Amino acid sequence: MIQGMTAGARWDRDNMEPRVREILDRTVVDRARGPYRAKTADQVAAILEGYFAKAEGLSGITISDVRRMAGGASKEQFAFVLRHVGDSEGTRLILRMDPLECISQSCRGREAQLHMAMKGVVPVAGIRGYDADGDILGQPGMIMDFVDGVTQPTDVKTVGVTGIGSRFDDWVPKLAPQFVDSYIKVHGFDFSKANLSYFEVPRAGTTDAAIWQVNWWSRLGWNALVEPVPIITLTERWLRENAPVCDKPVIVHGDLRIGNFMFEEPSGKFTAVLDWELGHIGDFHEDIAWVIQTLFGVRREDGVFLVCGLMPREEFLDAYQEQSGNRIDPVKLRYYEVLNAYKCAVMDLSQAIRAAKESTNHQDLVLSMLASAGAVFLDRIVQLLREA
Amino acid sequence: MLPNIDIRLANCIKALEEIVIPSLGEGERMAREQALLVIGHVRMIGAQWKHAARFEAKSFEAMAALAGEIAANEPDFRGELSDALAATETVDRGDIDAVEAAICRVGQAIDKAILGDEGTMALSAASVAAILDYGQKQAVRERVWFKGSGLDPDAAILPDFKPGL
């Protein structure tokens, strides 16, 4: 049980990656440009024609088969076919674009760089191009290769919003080994030679990794605040006063869970790890603590909780340790469970509600539905802090 | 006699289920997803609207009680918390907008005490315990309030909607 909070040195809220700070500050400015309206197919085609002409110098450009993609809670995504003088057959591509506000705020430049760095490490969609600040597209975005596959089997019984709360039954033997393997590969990747110019590396042996995250998410939360939530504020203080040392920074995906793995049917073979927007360099415990959250799993008939609807928590943790060689420190895991629940609470109860209120997203309705889950995280935080 | 709110909400759901969704083409996945979300929201609103003012009033009272406890334990913030409580004491409990504004007023004073001037001032164990107690009770109330969202993996063990208010 936590005791009182002690007086200490004044916090440095600016201690975070400069690019993250830039994005968070930009959000406040962009918010005033609302409301945001979902783009039509014609608007998207015009945007893309302009982009390919300017960014790639293509001529005779035709954009066709523009189709809005369902799913996700954040970005506007469209599949389309690009034809031009050098490619008359056409290439299927995906445009992933930022509305004015999302449930989280992130950088398409960082996401694209991570995609490119992870190519060949785990399956990822190729990056055709990106516009980190929306200089050409008019709003930040990235263009990816089209990848075949599904994020939920078409025959599962229990399916939830953005893959949350799905249960996989007969698919488990096909999906679970690849699921664990993805964590091993992402965390084992040597990023030292990768072009990650939008990123900073937290110093090993310091609390940078944790504090940068606290500063990221607390700034997002305070900037978006609609109504104070005392338990969120208490958690922020606890996170600042209990930040653990990160021994060896690794690539952290930030949202590595079912719903963000694309796979083929019926083989179940993974074709892409999606949604790297929250990716950063940090502590591996963060990804592990993220995926074991109750929101991302379901309970079996016997009451056993299944991580992402795939496997019991202890089975997942054991498999990860055995295959990665990383030892899970229970105190650090607990810290990152609190941090992740805090992040989710901030997303749901500050950012999502603010974006839904200001109408700055293309699907405000999804945001207000996700916001309704905020108390699940608050309840979990209380439990975790009491056990700390 | 007016068509009451329950009737109108039920009519909205029927129109979406029987007219709008069946008319969507196979390729309109996002429109279908949004229509299903509208149904989900409308169903929850149907269960909530009669209790909404009471729910918010009780949220305010719980937060005001927390402010009182923190004020008793944190002398440096007692003045600000007391001012916030005094300014909101007579808020009309039946006016949801006014109650929400009162929650914000009191909540801001609580947040300041918790942050303790950016971590430079201590927060007592008694205040931390009070915040955790309040936090747990309020979280359960809010989970019950949104039990129908389908996003709570442990919804089955939550109390029923009305007693949970």
Image (cartoon, coloured by chain):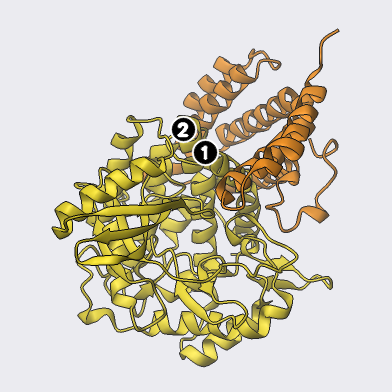
* Residue A121 coordinates in the image, percent (x, y): 37, 83
Measure the C-alpha gap from mark 1 to mark 2.
6 Å
Viewer-closest of A95 and B82:
A95
> In the displayed structure, does residue A268 sit left or right of residue A339?
right
Residue B128 % position (x, y): 58, 48
The residue depicted at 50 percent of the width and 36 percent of the height is: A356
Amino acid tagged 1: Asp
Tag 2 secondary structure: loop
Label located before the other in sequence (1 or 2):
2
Whole-percent x and y of residue B69?
62, 35
Q: Which chain does yellow denote in the image?
A: A
Q: Picture quarter containing residue A207?
A: bottom left
Number of the label disc, if any, that sits on residue B88: none
Check if mark 1 and mark 2 are on a common chain.
Answer: yes
Chain B tint as drawn: orange
Residue lying farthest to the top in this orientation: B1
Q: Could you tell me which residue is drawn at 38 percent across and 85 percent down? A: A188
Is the residue under label 2 in contact with that under label 1 (CB below 8 Å)? Answer: yes
Q: Which residue is mark 2?
A: A359
Is A62 rendered above or below residue B93?
Answer: below
Residue at 48% across, 71% down:
A148
